[in-house]
């Protein structure tokens, strides 16, 4: 029997110069040096707030999102999370993960 270890996807980290504020049901991110303003919906706020040292992998965040949104399928959460994190990284709001 061969045991295949699942690939662990390390999360990108928040950039130190990015300011976050809740606004209504969503939030905004502002990168002060790059002058980037980015609006977040309620799910985006949940994800941003889950980017903490306690949650170091994509699986950690997907697990927490599955608890918050029990009707969502884990593969869909993983795909949406990857897309969202990619967009934030491309915009310069996150430091790329070490595996990127």
Image (cartoon, helix red, strand yellow):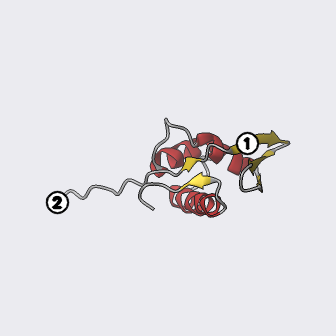
Q: Nearer the viewer, mark 1 or mark 2?
A: 1
Residue 20 marker: 1
Label 1 vs 2, first from the N-terminus? 2
Q: Residue furthest right?
A: 24
At 58% across and 57% down in the image, what residue appears? 81
Kindly indicate the quadrant of the structure image that contains residue 99.
bottom left
State yes or no: discs 1 and 2 in contact (Cβ < 8 Å).
no
At 55% across and 60% down in the image, what residue appears? 82
From the image, tell me which residue sits under label 2: 2
Quadrant into which the C terminus falls: bottom left
The answer to whether residue 25 is above or below residue 38 is above
Residue 26 location (% of width, % of height): 79, 46
Counting other residues with Cα less than 10 Å from the Cα at mark 1, is it few (<14), some (14-19), or many (20 or more)?
some
| Frontmost residue, 50 versus 66 | 50
At 49% across and 35% down in the image, what residue appears? 54
At 67% across and 44% down in the image, what residue appears? 17
| Frontmost residue, 74 versus 100 | 100
Residue 34 location (% of width, % of height): 72, 56
The answer to whether residue 55 is above or below residue 43 is above
Residue 96 location (% of width, % of height): 52, 57
Secondary element at tag 1: strand
Residue 4 location (% of width, % of height): 24, 59
């Amino acid at each position: 029997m061969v045991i295949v270890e699942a690939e662990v996807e390390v999360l990108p980290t928040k950039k130190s110069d990015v300011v976050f504020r809740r606004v209504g049901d969503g939030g905004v991110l502002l990168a002060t040096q790059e002058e980037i303003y980015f609006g977040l919906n309620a799910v985006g706020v949940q994800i941003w707030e889950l980017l903490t040292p306690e949650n170091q992998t994509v699986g950690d965040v997907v697990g927490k999102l599955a608890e918050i949104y029990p009707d969502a399928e884990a593969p869909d959460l993983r795909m949406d999370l990857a897309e969202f994190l990619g967009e934030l990284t491309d915009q310069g709001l996150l430091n790329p993960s070490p595996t990127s």
